[in-house]
Image (tube, rainbow, N blue to C red):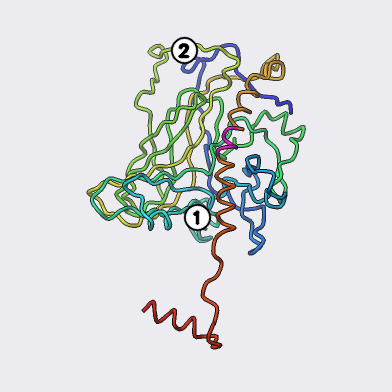
Amino acid sequence: MKRTLTLLASVLLLAGSLSFADEAMLIDFTLLDQDCIQDENTGKNTQNKRTVMDFSVAAGATFTEDQKNLMKTSLALPEWEIDLNSSARNVTSIAESKVVAAPVKDSAKVPFAGKNVMGVRVIFPTIAANANAKIVPPFDIPAYEPLADADDNGVRQEPSDEQKASGKTLFEDGYGLVKNVGTVKSIAVTTMGMNYPHGLYVLLKDNDNIERRYFMGYLAFDGWKTLVWNNPQYITEIRQREIRVYPIYPRGLPFVKFCGFQVTRDAAHIGDNYIGYFKDVKIIYDKALLTSDRDIADEDLWGIITKKETARQYAEMQRFGNVQVNRYLEKEKMATEESFSDSLGDGASAQKNQGQAAN
């Protein structure tokens, strides 16, 4: 499929005199509700329609179409993962650390009352050991996935003419991606503190696939608060800036994407449970370009970026697709019985004996 991509203008000035700061929503967790792909047992939706991705490309020929349809995932909040470092990993922490959709009360005095935010639980060790946990999306957010709707079964449709003309990609506008980013001036996180002494970092990745982390501050406060990181190397005096000029095509339009949070626990601080809530992440940045309107559609003519990103995305789909397939197989193999069958003819015997053994 031919993709129309908005690309760089004739000169890319990362910090030039024509650049100016802009604010954008990088990711808004209130947008990531589960609104498609019903669970056959509960009837509840399991995935987020805007961000659903099909990773059944990695499945073998032995799987039926119905089984492959279950190998989809999205940025729906319960799909996010907790990645614990070696000091924090044990059976309990792995089993109990998770991300959920946390409903905010309708009576709450915040603009997002009545909506779901990201709720996080991490089990840190109680021993004196430095530990950290990353809250990461289920897959690396694609930068060039075409904007298109998905149906209730998570099947992506062909982009409409309006969507093609917008020049937007699937994960922009609050779903984890911001394009035309030069220098990042500030980052803001809206989070609820619970008086934990832990530190919070934001993880971002740029168009050169370089991941960086930004220290937002400590979570030792109560209630909702906006934590802000200001770039200490941001130069406001234009004449003092270093102007960098890059080739326009096929490097592509600079972007940043959200890679997750990192919560750090110092060995001297309290361990055990950490509970946190996150609403959104915003950035203020210098635009790389004032205008991205091109007289010639370079990508339609040469297709270099599409080929490169397709190869990268296919490799990601293969890697994560294998994980999805293995998780699907493991789920099918899990025991579903809650108790033993009755061998004595008394329906309560097995349950009663089980309770006595536990005592």
Quadrant housing residue 247: top right
The x and y percentages for residue 299 are 67, 19
The x and y percentages for residue 281 are 48, 40
Q: Nearer the viewer, residue 152 or 54?
A: 54
Quadrant housing residue 233: top left
Labels 2 and 1 touching (C-beta < 8 A): no
Q: Which residue is mark 2?
A: 244
- Residue at x-position 59% and y-position 52%: 328
Q: Nearer the viewer, residue 286 or 92?
A: 92
| Amino acid tagged 2 | Arg
Tag of residue 100: 1
Point out the residue furthest to the right here. Answer: 161
Near mark 2 (Cα within 10 A), the count class, few <14, some 14-19 or many ≥20, is few
What secondary structure is the stretch in magenta mostly built from?
helix
Q: Quadrant location of the C terminus?
A: bottom left
For residue 339, above or below residue 189: below
Q: Nearer the viewer, residue 318 or 139?
A: 318
Q: Quadrant location of the N terminus?
A: top right
Quadrant housing residue 296: top right
For residue 357, above or below residue 9: below
The residues bearing labels 2 and 1 have C-alpha atoms spaced at a distance of 43 Å
Mark 1: secondary structure: strand
| Amino acid tagged 1 | Val
Task: Point out the frontmost of discs 2 and 1.
Answer: 1
Range of magenta residues: 315-319
Mark 2: secondary structure: loop
